Each structure stands twice: as C-alpha cells, then as structure tokens.
C-alpha cells in the first residue's frame, strides 16, 4: 500500500475515533467511561479487520495480537494511549495505536507472518486527567503498578477500583495484566511531536532519544471560610490567596533554572461562592526536567516553600506525591532500527528528545523501548487544533512496517 493510501486510511480512522467523546462539541475521553468503552469497541473492529485477535485485560487495556510463526517468541509491541485530555486534539495517543493497526493490516493483506507475534496496545490511561495519576495501563503490563493507586479518587469521589469494576475490569486480577520478564521483545510508540522542531526543519518524522522525568503533586490548603464583607483582611485565613502565592513561587523557581518546567494545571477553591472567603484550595503541580537530580531538588524546594507559605498564612497543608517518573532513555538498538528504516524510505534521520511524558517511559524499565515522532502543525497539542498531514501519517506507518520486516530478517538489521 502506498504512503498516501496508508495515510488516507489512518486519517479517516482518526477522524472517526475522534468523534467518540463524553462531551458534545469537544473531545473528552477519560478512562473507564462509556466513551472509553465505545472507543475500544471501534478500535477492536479495526484490529479484527487487520487479522488480529483481541482482548481487554483486567486494567482496561485493549490488546490486539497478530500471531507469529512461533507463538512462544517474545512479542514486538506497538501502541499508545486511547484516553485524552479535556478538549483534546484527535492525534495525541490514538495515532500510535492506529499506526500499529495499519502496519499489521499491511502484513495481513500481504499474507506475511513474522517469526514473532506482534501486539498493538491501546493503553487505558496515560494523560492522568481523571485521577491525577498516569501510565495505569502500561505500568500494569510491566507489573509495576502500585495497587495503592486503586484507591485514588476522581472529583466525584469515585476510586480507580470502583471505576474499573463498573467498566468491567477486575482490580483483584491486576497481576494477570503483567507480562513475564523477557516476553516483550521491544516496544515502539508512534506519537505526534507536540513541539515545533520537526516542522521547523521540514521533516516528517524524528527518532526520540530520551524523555524527561516528571513529578505530580496534589496540594490541599485549608483555611477558614467566612463572609466576604465582614471579615477584615488581617483576620483572614484565605486558602485561595495562599494558593496564588504557591503558584507564583512555582513559576519563579522553574523559570530560574534552564530545562526545568513547572505547571499548576488545576485549581479548585471551596466553597466557591462569590461572597465567601475560600476556606479550602486544591491545586495540582507538574514538575519536569530531563535530569532527575534537577527535578528532585526542585520538587523538594517547592514542597518546603508551600509549607512555609501555609504556615505564614495560618493554613493547614497536605501535599501528596501522586506520580514520580524518572527520565527515560530510548533503547539505542531501537534508535538504530528506526534510523535504518528512515534511510531505506529515503528520509533524513533526525534525533530529538521529548519534553512530554509517554507510555514509553513506563515500558523502558521493562523492555527495550523507543519512539517515533510525527510532525504536527505549529507544535500544537492538547488542543483541538492538533494537525498532521495524510502523507506524514502514511510515512510513519511505512517506517513502522519496515522496522517489523527488518526485525524478521536479521540480515537487514544493523
């Protein structure tokens, strides 16, 4: 199948999948929701058309399998996440799933069986929007998911365990989602770049060398709610004012250090009335850096600053560490295979790092893992304006298909 034909199929499917949402007028697909279930059902159909068998594991990952000549051989796994942020674009996550399906479909159409099985994973939760955690699906596959996270609750008070049961999963069987050590030959994720480098250099795709580490914290500041008109300023314990001071400290601290970024992505003031002093403020922190030592020291400074701010304002303070992910280096041999595939397709080889987190980070601690970035217009992501071209989508699928065929022929590998 030509690059254009592959791209057309991919884009049509991405458009169709992008219409599955919990909200009218915007894409919002959270884990363990009816929209998640509808998306799984649709992708499962395409997996079957590509010659794969499918299953949904106990954590809610959809896994498609294209059997190899030796079913017992370690699998080559492709994939990405099927969940989205709120008001999302349609390519972040699903592109990697559907590129995998397209590559397998091309093998099936040609009647090719590789020496090893190929699996495509649609991970249940990478964005972490609903529960302020992330990599639930990929960590479960790696056997590194802490069962304690199942008690984390969303804004409606529903725990991950409760949501998973309602979805049809089984939190008591999470161990069954884990793959045995050595059973995954390698993991490859295709993803939009979420940055401007490839577009600026007029390159369709690039090979990822490393992914920066990240920490996520949930902060609760407790003050005293009171009448907005009768409590003098000097007598207030305004939780929201304390949160504002925290936000500005995070901005100053991270702006002062190269390669360090910090974001307060969510804030909630309670009780949330126009004429009531906020008695409680809840906020999330996301701190990232390519160097784990740099990130850890920054997080420690920020935590100490939050406690000082709370104490000075007479506020109670609770800080929860909801996610810590070390920086990840992509496997050199996967980088070599991808470079070989790019050259064979007549494409220049471009290496770049990732400033965003991906399921590859979780997989990299379990098996050789790598990423292929696809150019996106303006570097825009987490936004309905996400945009890629038909040709670039098709190019990514052809590169992945060539990597699979090279892996089946040791003579073709470097």
Image: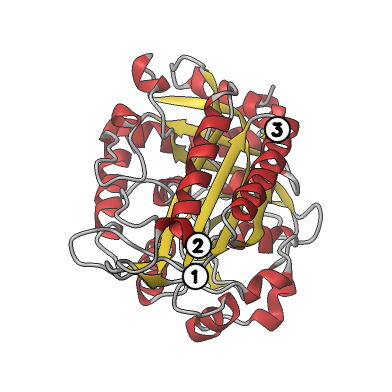
Mark 1 crowdedness (10 Å alpha carbons): few <14, some 14-19, many ≥20? some
Asked whether residue 354 is in view, the answer is no
**CA distance for labels 3 and 1:** 52 Å
Q: Label 3 crowding class (10 Å Cα cut-off): few <14, some 14-19, many 20+?
A: many
Front position in the image: 281 or 14: 281
**On screen, 32 above or below 63?**
below
Q: Secondary structure at mark 2?
A: loop
Q: Quadrant of the C terminus?
A: top right
Label 3 or label 1, whichever comes before in sequence order:
1
Q: How many marks?
A: 3
Q: Residue 224, labelled with which disc? A: 1
Residue 331's label in the rendered image is 3
Q: CA separation, marks 3 and 2? A: 51 Å
Helix, strand or loop at disc 1? loop
Q: Residue at x 28, y 47 (%)?
A: 9
- SS for callout 3: loop
Residue 192 coordinates in the image, percent (x, y):
41, 37
In the image shown, does 400 or 16 lie closer to the viewer? 16
**Residue 318: x %, y % from top left:** 64, 63
Q: Nearer the viewer, mark 3 or mark 2?
A: 2
* Spot occupied by residue 82 in the image (x, y as percentages of width and height): 44, 58
- Figure check: 106 above or below 163: above
Residue at left 51%, top 33%? 372
Q: Indicate left or right for 140 with 248 as reference.
A: right
Label for residue 237? 2
Q: Are marks 1 and 2 in contact (CB under 8 Å)?
A: yes
Q: Is residue 407 left or right of residue 358?
A: right
Residue located 32% across and 41% down the image? 6
Comes first in the chain, label 3 or label 2: 2
């Amino acid at each position: 199948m030509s690059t254009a034909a592959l791209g057309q199929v991919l884009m049509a499917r991405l458009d169709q999948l992008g219409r599955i949402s919990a909200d009218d007028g915007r894409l919002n697909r959270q884990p363990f929701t009816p929209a998640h279930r509808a998306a799984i059902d649709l992708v499962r159909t395409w997996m079957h058309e590509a010659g794969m068998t499918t299953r949904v594991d106990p954590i809610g990952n959809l896994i498609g399998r294209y059997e190899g000549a030796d079913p017992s051989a370690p699998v080559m796994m492709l994939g990405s996440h099927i969940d989205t942020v709120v008001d999302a674009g349609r390519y972040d996550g699903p592109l990697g799933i559907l590129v995998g399906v397209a590559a397998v479909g091309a093998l099936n159409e040609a009647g090719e069986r590789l020496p090893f099985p190929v699996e495509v994973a649609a991970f249940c939760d990478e964005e972490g929007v609903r529960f302020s955690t992330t990599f639930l699906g990929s960590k479960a596959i790696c056997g590194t998911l802490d069962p304690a996270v199942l008690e984390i609750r969303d804004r409606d008070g529903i725990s991950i365990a409760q949501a998973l049961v309602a979805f049809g999963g089984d939190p008591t069987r999470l161990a069954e989602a884990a793959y045995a050590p050595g059973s995954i030959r390698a993991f490859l994720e295709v993803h939009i770049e979420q940055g401007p480098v490839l577009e600026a250099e007029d390159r369709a795709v690039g090979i990822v060398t490393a992914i920066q580490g990240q920490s996520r914290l949930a902060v609760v500041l407790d003050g005293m709610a009171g009448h907005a008109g009768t409590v003098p300023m000097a007598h207030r314990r305004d939780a929201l004012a304390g949160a504002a001071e925290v936000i500005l400290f995070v901005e100053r601290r991270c702006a002062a250090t190269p390669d360090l970024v910090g974001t307060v992505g969510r804030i909630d003031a309670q009780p949330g009335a126009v004429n009531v002093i906020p008695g409680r403020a809840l906020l999330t922190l996301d701190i990232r850096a390519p160097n784990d030592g740099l990130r850890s020291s920054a997080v420690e400074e920020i935590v100490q600053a939050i406690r000082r701010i709370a104490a000075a304002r007479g506020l109670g303070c609770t800080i929860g560490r909801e996610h810590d992910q070390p920086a990840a280096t992509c496997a050199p041999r996967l980088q070599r295979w991808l470079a070989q595939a790019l050259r064979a397709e007549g494409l220049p080889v471009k290496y770049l790092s990732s400033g965003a987190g991906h399921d590859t980070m979780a997989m990299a601690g379990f098996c050789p893992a790598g990423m292929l970035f696809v150019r996106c217009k303006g570097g825009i992501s987490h936004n309905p304006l996400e945009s890629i071209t038909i040709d670039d989508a098709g190019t990514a699928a052809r590169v992945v298909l060539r990597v699979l065929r090279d892996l089946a022929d040791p003579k073709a590998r470097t």
